[in-house]
Image: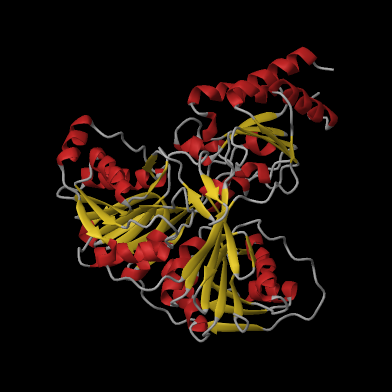
Amino acid sequence: MENSRIYIIAELRKGRITQETFELLGFAHFIGKEKSPVFLLPGKNTEEPAREISQKTGCDAVALTARHLEHYNTLSYAHAVLEILVKEDEAWICLPHTSMGYDLAPRLAVLLNAACITGVESAGHGSLRRPIYSGRFKEDIVPKTPRVVVTVLPGAFPLCEKRTGPAGRVTVVEVACKEHLSQTLGTEEAEHTDRMIRDAEVIVAAGRGIGKKENLSLVKQLANLFPRSAVGASRSVCDLGWLEYRHQIGATGQSVSPRLYIACGISGAFQHVSGIRGAQTIVAVNRDPHAAIFQVAHYCIVEDLTTFIPLLIEMWAQKGPH
Amino acid sequence: MKILVCIKQVPDSFETLQIDERTGRLVLPAGTAFRMNRFDEFALEEALLIKETHRDTLVHALSVGPERVSAALQRALGMGADHGIHILDPFEGYRSPFTVASFIATFARTRRYDIILAGVMAEDTMACQTGQLIAALLDLPCATSVMKEEVHLNRGQITAEREIEGGSREKVQLKLPAVLTIQPGINVPRYPSFSKVMRARTCAQERIRAGDIEVPEPRESSRGIHFPEAASHGVFIQGSPKEKALKLINILHQKSLLS
């Protein structure tokens, strides 16, 4: 893989380059050392964003433009980048592990006869490391093909520092219009942002580990100890109907940045953790000492929350407000 | 219409699972309970809902794995699937999503399904690949993370809404046959009904030996599984439950988080 070129497929949301795209540069440096990756930007009019990337990163950027690329679509995007990628016998193709990245990566891998390794959080010694079993374990995967498609977990690699060097080269390629078996009609913005959660200073959040809906009252009681607090939830708690989706925190819910986040019975899979990166202090209560949430929490408490929360509330009442 | 739902069986609880540090393999303690991957329950329910609105629809449930996975198919039949297909793969070690998808795609190619459904991912391996790989191998269109779908048989199309970051929706129109991976929350999966469970017991599952299906060489291998390194920056609060509670209250006081 020494000679492999590294490609990064950039993601744009509402016309702006996502942070996850820039994080991929960190991953590229990790696998390619000094090698400079090439950014590919499929879209309707991506010359400007390509220029922005080339200035910010010093890397070359290719804007792949066509009217039918206005919205992300698996097949039209795959075929747009394929024109460039098929020319490489050996290559790393990196995408963010987002709704675009995990949708596109397997398609590209099949079209390129490439290995496909998704949800990667680190790399080294020829293998890529990814969390499994809700992050309880890690698995090291070795690609066995000269072309490798990788999706990298948001937040796994830090943003690279600002640089002052010459900008990379920008190329614009017009992609021929083609009929595909699927077509993206457009996007609709989410309605369920909840101001209570967004503005809360303290969020107490419930995961599936609370066991049953009745235990939500414990979480609510704990939240009530704090002024300007709100109750949050992991995706699975909302899917079970225990709380409404407006309480959901994580990749497909809201991203929050409270002063204090208390995770109760939350396993800590990346979909949830990516929504609490802005929290100043994270406390986690979980009875499994290997729960992934303990890797991001500042204060970790291995206890059964059905006994621990009542105890905590009781001790707090005894100590009384100072 | 013929619908194929891909189902994976996973351990019921991850908390009891251990690792053999020597081999880097997962150890399933004796008596480990298994169940259907929750994401696949939503996919199966969606297939059953399509069957309710489109007459003459058949729902086939398929699973790849050792002997034990036939219990997951049994549950699928109990929920209302018409037919169970077990691709018997006795191997308990690492199987890449590509290999599993190749088994399923090779099988499905000759059966002419109109719709193939799968959960958006498996709870255990978390790859988010199998559905998309099946689609790519069969050269079918695919939409992932689907939160709403509508079949238009007269136009030979299916429209789907994908859930994307922040809960926004992306609308996609796909020509049938198509593959959808289903996002949890799209529906409320039903419990198996008594009468269907009884029927499922007598229902023979179709069995195909994985070894009889020709698939390409794997493109990835596993170097092993391990526990994560110790928490990077966290502090484990020690002591009796009472002491832990007191210590936490003190920490929150110091940080002026509790008044």
Check the image and tell me how it is coloured. secondary structure
- The quadrant the N terminus of chain A occupies is bottom right
Quarter residue A155 falls in: bottom right
Q: Position of residue A174 (x, y in %)?
A: 52, 83
Quarter residue A178 falls in: bottom left
Q: Residue furthest top?
A: A318
Q: Position of residue B160 (x, y in %)?
A: 37, 55
- The quadrant the C terminus of chain A occupies is top right
Answer left or right for B183 relative to A169: left
Q: Nearer the viewer, residue A49 or A158?
A: A158
Q: Nearer the viewer, residue A26 or A278?
A: A26
Answer left or right for B102 relative to B128: left
Judge whether residue A150 can be spotted in this image. yes
Answer left or right for B38 relative to B225: left
Judge whether residue B49 can be spotted in this image. no
Compared to residue A57, the image places residue B135 above or below, namely above
Q: Nearer the viewer, residue B220 or A58?
A: B220
Residue at x-position 40% and y-position 54%: B92
Q: Position of residue B224 (x, y in %)?
A: 54, 59
Q: Position of residue A277 (x, y in %)?
A: 68, 47
Q: So how many labels did they put on this image?
A: 0
Compared to residue A162, the image places residue A35 above or below, namely below
Compared to residue A66, the image places residue B8 above or below, namely above
Q: Nearer the viewer, residue B112 or A71?
A: B112
Compared to residue A181, the image places residue A153 above or below, namely above
Residue at x-position 53% and y-position 85%: A88
Quarter residue A316 falls in: top right
Residue at x-position 27% and y-position 43%: B76
